[in-house]
Amino acid sequence: MQGFLDEAVRRGIHSMLSNPLTLSLLARAVGSVGDWPESRLETFELACRTMAGEHNPEHQAAAHRARPSAAATNVSTLVHAAGYLCAVILLVGRDG
């Protein structure tokens, strides 16, 4: 546990540790083997893709049966759409 915390500080992503959701995403992104992404950007992108993915095994199976490539496509589409919406919110100066 301390090694995980020390590595997060060393990589400059320790701010992700103060929020339970981002901490959980970071822990899943790194995995039990400690395979850290190469950069802060990679870490953030992996966490976003993890958050955008379907976590319900029954829904995953149904999506795979309907269209085997649907899971990867849906995550990419969701991440792209979220980025677009975030940009719009920033540009118009509104709260989310």
Image (spheres, rainbow, N blue to C red):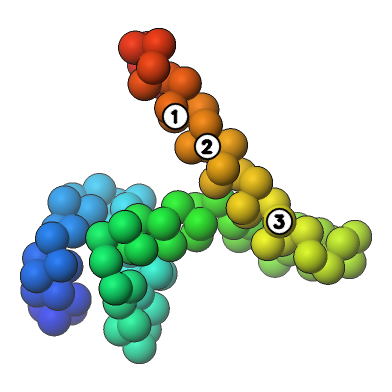
Residue 24 in view (yes/no):
no
**Quadrant position of residue 31:** bottom left
Residue kind at label 2, given as amino acid type: Ala
Q: In which quarter of the image is the C terminus?
A: top left
Helix, strand, or loop for circle 3? helix
Residue 43, x across and y down, in percent: 33, 63
Residue, x 35% and y 51% (percent of image)? Answer: 21
Q: Earlier in the sequence, mark 3 or mark 1?
A: 3
Left or right of 48: which side holds 95? left
Give me the C-alpha separation between circle 2 and circle 1.
6 Å
Helix, strand, or loop for circle 2? helix
Residue 79 in view (yes/no):
yes
Q: Quadrant of the N terminus?
A: bottom left
Q: Do the residues labelled 2 and 1 touch (CB within 8 Å)?
A: yes
Residue, x 29% and y 73% (percent of image)? Answer: 38
Residue 86, x across and y down, in percent: 44, 29
Residue 16, x across and y down, in percent: 23, 53
Q: In this figure, which residue is indicated by the disc labeled 2?
A: 82
Residue kind at label 3, given as amino acid type: Thr
Within 10 Å of disc 3 (Cα), the crowding (few <14, some 14-19, many 20+) is few
Q: In this figure, which residue is indicated by the disc labeled 3?
A: 73
Q: Which of marks 2 and 3 is nearer the N terminus?
A: 3
Give me the C-alpha separation between circle 2 and circle 3.
14 Å
Helix, strand, or loop for circle 1? helix
Q: In this figure, which residue is indicated by the disc labeled 1?
A: 86
Outermost residue, bottom side: 33
Residue kind at label 1, given as amino acid type: Cys
Between residues 22 and 85, which one lies in front from this camera angle? 85
**Quadrant position of residue 75:** bottom right
Within 10 Å of disc 1 (Cα), the crowding (few <14, some 14-19, many 20+) is few
**Quadrant position of residue 10:** bottom left
Left or right of 2: which side holds 43? right
